[in-house]
Amino acid sequence: MTIVSFNGVGKIYRRRGLGSSSQVVALTDFTLDIEKGEILGLLGLNGAGKTTVMKLLTGLLFPTTGGVSVFGLDPREPQAKNSIGFLPELPYFSPHVTAASALRYYGRLSGMPPRAIEAALPAVIEKVGLVPHKAKKISEFSKGMLQRLGLAQAVLHSPELLVLDEPVSGLDPLAIHDMRALISRLQAEGRTIFLSSHSISELEKICDRVIIMVRGRQARAVKREEWEMTSGGLEALFVEAVTSGARD
Amino acid sequence: MNGLKKIFKSVSCPALFPTPYSLFPGCLDTVRSVAAETFRESVKNRFFTIFAVFAACAIYASLLVGVMAVDEEARVLSDLGLGLMELMTLAYALFHAAMAIPREVETKTIYLVFSRPVSRPAYLLGKASGLYLLSAFMLSVMAAIHLSLMALRGFPPGLVYFHILACIWLKVIIITSLALFISLFSTSPVSTMVISGIIWTLGHFTPEARFLVEKTAGFSGRLLKGAAWLIPDLQLYNLRDAPLAAAPGVWFQFAYAALWALGSYGAAVLLFKKKEF
């Protein structure tokens, strides 16, 4: 069952200055379907358009051409947003509060009643492994703990679809291992996960399917069986896609 | 009735003003949550340093004027305290109004907000309400310090003292609303503060500016006349310079501030609804 569709989506960033304007083409004719229950990875070099895709999906950006639908709705619709949990790259939280306090705020913004927030909090804090740090202020958190908190705010309202932008960026090996286990657990709960990463080995380990992006275009879609049968694995397919994309 | 609901819902959150159906109940919760968060964030940011500076200045000034003002000590002490309160509240509220949204964009906190079912008009209303609450709280605490000091010197305040406090708050509401709107298109928080500061200053010279505009003829006169409408008349709130009998009524002062706050909010919603992050 398809839950997200990108239909010939184009995105152009326009910058207007005094008497001049410039534009950057971030995405061209991007088409993609995300199936329910899968872990889909987005792989590409810096500036390939990965974050643009994620922001279009979460309604933070609007497409210049084409259309995006989430559960059959425009991503800007409140019902569509309610079914998405988003973890941006390097999330920021107010340093003066505790993790529980920050989660309460985001729970309220998700439209959760106070009782539902209080009921969900202990399980979510436990799920992301923040129990020993729940009384600490966020200013005392390490990068890995912030990333865990970021994931906690994304899953608090039990969304069906999780959009994770560079979830392992800047984490130490142990934190990466924990994050990988966490993502697998979330998939086992029946959630669909869409994540972007620079790390080929990470995507290789957890994804069912990977989309390789080159210069704002989808260069290739690869299934797990395909990279498992290729010598050199996903890396070889990625290098091939990027070099042929650069030649075009 | 259902048809009316449908119309309201269709123009609700993305529309210019939040309608009753867009504000209740979900959007009202958003307004409350954002307002509380804005207030809490601002209070944690060197808030008590401001009070310490105010208390130190007020105590020092009271000792000084006690020696210098002789018969006018009560008036000087009251005017000085109120002036200090106005400036400190203005500076602090302006700083936070200029930073409120740009800081959320810069730290990307806004991604966590707008990837949720949060209506943009409700978010802006929450930000503005949090800032109004902040200035009211600041004024209350500083007034408590000031009143204690005056009581200690044996000068009980009259009712007009509280009217002046309300006027200061209304002026700060007007300028905070404008600063919040300006922050959506200005290039930096500093430029927002500078522009708002200029509007604040011009607002205290509106009668003089209008007199000069009346004297200017032709196209430039018409242009200046139009521009004069873009500056709020803050002299309406200056009870210290005008005799009390000549001051406008309290309801007019409230209505005038509400009109400016609502106008700035409407313009901010218009700008904000198409903003991408």
Image (spheres, coloured by chain):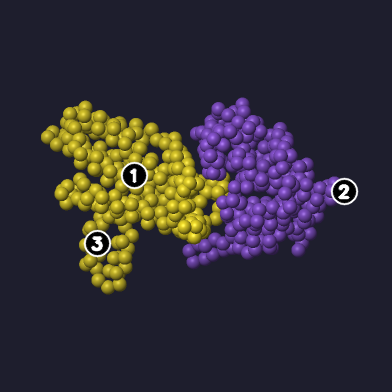
Chain colours: A purple, B yellow
The chain under label 2 reads A
Residue B71 drawn at (x, y percent): 12, 35
Nearer to me, B157 or B121: B121
**Residue B92 visible, this orientation:** no
Q: Which mark is residue B210?
A: 3
- Badge 1 is on which residue? B90
Q: Amino acid at mark 3?
A: Arg
Question: Is label 2 on the same chain as label 1?
Answer: no
Between B273 and A71, the residue placed more toward the observer is: A71
Residue at 80% from the left image edge and 55% from the top image edge:
A240
Q: Is residue B167 visible?
A: yes
Q: CA distance from mark 3 to mark 2?
A: 81 Å
Residue that extends furthest to the front in the rendered view of this protein: B1
Q: Quadrant of the C terminus of chain A?
A: bottom right
Q: Amino acid at mark 2?
A: Met
> Does dot 3 land on a helix, a strand or a loop?
helix
Name the residue tied to disc 2. A229
User: Disc 3 is attached to a residue of which chain?
Assistant: B
Query: Mark 2 to mark 1: distance in Å?
Result: 67 Å
Disc 1 secondary structure class: helix
